Amino acid sequence: MAVITDISQLDLSKSYTYADTLDWHFKEYVELIGGRVFAKPTPLTMHQQCLGNLAGEIGRYCKHRPFQAWMGPLDVRLAAARLADSQITTVVQPDLFVLHDRRKMDRRGCVGAPDWIIEIISPGTAIHDTKTKFDLYAENEVREYWIVYPGEQTISVYVLREGEYQPQADYYEPGLIPSHTLPELQLEWADVFEGVA
């Protein structure tokens, strides 16, 4: 297959696999969900500020524990480890994810579902993050899912129970936000949104 250097070279009505994406060399970040291409918009500064704040806090917590925190863009192949690249049709790039099983990581990213995913809403990603990925992550048994709304300074926390996400709480004011994946970790709401204007 020829190397693709511009997203406009793709036929967006076609279904693609992870093997196809390895020949894509363009500046846009994209995700595959069921073989369909979804372009990711460039994040705003408030998105990046929240991401840095969360990654710093969670990364420090994980440093001397059996968990790893990873920041996007990094491919998460939501497929069984035994599938060939040409059989994988769902590859996402969460803003932040945490996993306990280090064997899921290889040189190209994560194979299988992380334990905890955090997505930060950007203009144009709200429906994708709150519906498409919400359903996808539940289907793939991501145990905990946080959706961060930087403009509203709100965090919605969901925990997987019996195959469906159950809302835990919406955090929109100073106070502690507990993680269900890392039970000893509690993030301070003000620290997550520090510097976000």
Image (cartoon, helix red, strand yellow):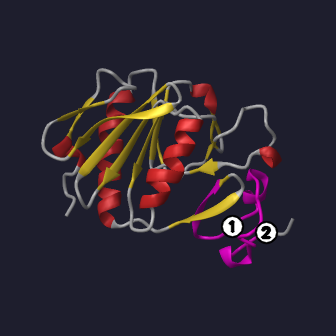
Disc 2 residue type (three-letter):
Val
Give the camera-side residue of 167 and 66: 167
- Circle 1: is it few (<14), some (14-19), or many (20+) Cα within 10 Å? few
Give the camera-side residue of 36 and 3: 36
**Residue lying at 28% horizontally and 46% vertically, measured from the top left:** 155
**Residue lying at 51% horizontally and 24% vertically, measured from the top left:** 162
- Where are the magenta residues, as a range? 4-32
Q: Which residue corresponds to mark 2?
A: 3
Task: Give the residue furthest to the left.
Answer: 174
* C-alpha distance separating marks 1 and 2: 7 Å
Total labels drawn: 2
In the image, is 40 to the left or to the right of 54? Answer: right
Helix, strand, or loop for circle 2?
loop
- Disc number placed over residue 87 in the picture, else none: none
**In the rendered structure, which disc, 1 or 2, sits on the residue that comes first in sequence?**
2
Q: Is residue 181 above or below residue 59?
A: above
The image position of residue 78, as x and y in percent, is 64, 40
Give the camera-side residue of 124 and 8: 124
In the image, is 56 to the left or to the right of 173? Answer: right
**Residue lying at 39% horizontally and 68% vertically, measured from the top left:** 123
The image position of residue 2, as x and y in percent, is 84, 69
- Circle 2: is it few (<14), some (14-19), or many (20+) Cα within 10 Å? few
Q: Main secondary structure of the magenta part?
A: loop
**Residue lying at 16% horizontally and 45% vertically, measured from the top left:** 190
Q: Which residue corresponds to mark 1?
A: 25
* Quadrant the N terminus occupies: bottom right
Q: Are marks 1 and 2 in contact (CB under 8 Å)?
A: yes
The image position of residue 101, as x and y in percent, is 56, 24
Task: Give the residue furthest to the bottom.
Answer: 8
